[in-house]
Amino acid sequence: MSAHNFTVDRLEVGLMGANCYIVANSSTKDACLIDPGGEPDRIKNFLKKKGLNLKFIINTHGHGDHILGNGYFDCPVYIHRLEKDFLTDPNKNLSGMFGLFLKTSKAAKLLEDEEKVLLDDLELEIMHTPGHTPGGISIKLNGVVFTGDTLFAGGVGRTDLPDGNDETLLKSIKEKLFNLNDDTIVYPGHGEESTIGQEKRTNPFFV
């Protein structure tokens, strides 16, 4: 996708098929990664092929399938302050359950709700959308929103894992995400894209 002077590309990575998004400023070729959850060499090759300069990584939350690739890139990692320990604690990031015991780069920046993260003249706005995890975030940028494992096309994030909360998750979606314009494109942590309007009308958790 290309609009508003930026591009969004999606790579499905890792055993869990997490979506890694490459957001690039069309003018400057500076880029950020959202959730490099695996296959770092493939992501690096994509960046190289497109001639992009990676500036930082944002994790929507700290589960292993979204943070696995963090340490393979020479750039700072940003995550919500409530997920700080997920980066280095295999029990929190759930990798311990799979015998992986993942410890990745420590956060260079701890994010807060409504904080603005700049990629040159692009402004990524952090929305705290807890429920799947306590510090789960969505990231808003000019008509698109990256929802991590909060909202999917036709579904919502799991809340049966440690630190999950069903009521909190549905509240995050209804009170924050569903307040965005209906034509806002939803880029979820797994699966295909959707729009806010589509999810309001057809998502079985809300209709």
Image: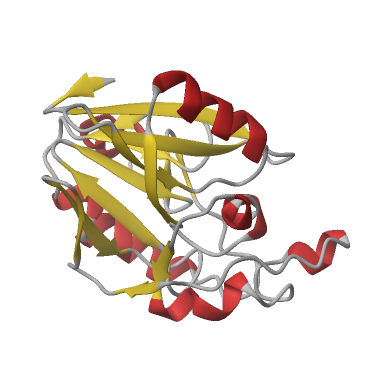
Front residue of 184 and 154: 184
Q: Can you give x and y, in whole percent of width and height, for residue 182 in the image? A: 15, 35
Task: Give the quadrant of residue 82.
Answer: bottom left
Residue at 84% in and 59% down: 98
Position above or below: 27 against 132: above
Task: Give the quadrant of residue 30.
Answer: top left
Front residue of 18 and 41: 41
Total marks placed: 0
Q: Can you give x and y, in whole percent of width and height, for residue 138 in the image? A: 32, 55
120 vs 18, left or right, is left
Q: Quadrant of the C terminus?
A: top left
Question: Can residue 135 be seen in the rendering of this structure?
Answer: yes
Question: Can residue 205 be seen in the rendering of this structure?
Answer: no
Residue at 58% in and 67% down: 105
25 vs 101, left or right, is left
Q: Quadrant of the N terminus?
A: top left
21 vs 44, left or right, is left
Q: Can you give x and y, in whole percent of width and height, for residue 198 in the image? A: 27, 29
Residue sitting at the far right: 99
